[in-house]
Image (cartoon, rainbow, N blue to C red):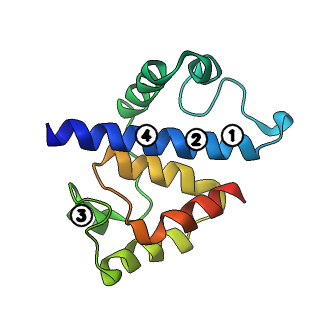
């Protein structure tokens, strides 16, 4: 049951982050066919079940690491359970990447079962929004 809740929370976070990024991109800059799967535009209209399919499609791809293998130690932790020192490890990775990489890094964390600390979520969203 706990794993199901974590998966649903991760999917919800990914959905919110994808929506935030797409909302900020002018129509001319939005990638053809979406970012997570070929039918993301259709998924936006179809709802959560289609978004789930997009996330699952992304999950079968090889997980991309951002020189952050040390964060795998936090697999299964809740986002509100990190100390400030632990959150600083995530922030260090976040601040070394380009804003265009933040969305992919967030997806990588989700696919690896790692929740982003609450302390840096706002900063990650701001970087994605540009």
Q: In this rendering, is residue 22 above or below 122?
A: above
Q: Nearer the viewer, mark 4 or mark 3?
A: 4
From the top left corner, tell me how far across and down residue 114 is, in percent. Answer: 30, 55
Q: Nearer the viewer, mark 4 or mark 1?
A: 4
Q: Is residue 99 left or right of residue 91?
A: right
Which residue is under mark 3?
74
**Mark toward the start of the polypeptide (2 vs 4):** 4
From the top left corner, tell me how far across and down residue 104 is, in percent. Answer: 52, 49
The residues bearing labels 4 and 3 have C-alpha atoms spaced at a distance of 20 Å
Which residue is under mark 4?
12
Q: In this rendering, is residue 69 above or below 27?
A: below
Quarter of the image with the N terminus is top left
At label 2, counting other C-alpha atoms closer than 10 Å, the crowd grade (few under 14, some 14-19, many 20 or more) is many
Which residue is under mark 2?
18
Q: Are the residues at dot 1 and dot 2 in contact (C-beta closer than 8 Å)?
A: yes
**Mark toward the start of the polypeptide (4 vs 3):** 4
Question: Based on the displayed image, in which of its 4 quarters is residue 130 positioned?
Answer: bottom right
């Amino acid at each position: 049951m706990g794993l199901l809740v974590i998966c649903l929370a991760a999917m919800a976070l990914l959905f919110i982050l994808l929506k935030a990024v797409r909302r900020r991109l002018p129509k001319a800059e939005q990638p053809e066919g979406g970012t997570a799967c070929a039918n993301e535009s259709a998924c936006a209209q179809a709802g959560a079940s289609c978004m789930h399919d997009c996330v699952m499609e992304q999950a079968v791809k090889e997980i991309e690491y951002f020189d952050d293998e040390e964060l795998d130690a936090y697999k299964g932790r809740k986002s509100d359970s990190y100390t400030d020192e632990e959150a600083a490890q995530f922030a260090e990775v976040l601040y070394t990447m380009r804003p265009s990489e933040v969305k992919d890094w967030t997806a990588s964390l989700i696919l690896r079962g790692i929740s982003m600390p609450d302390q840096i979520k706002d900063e990650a969203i701001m970087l994605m929004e540009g």
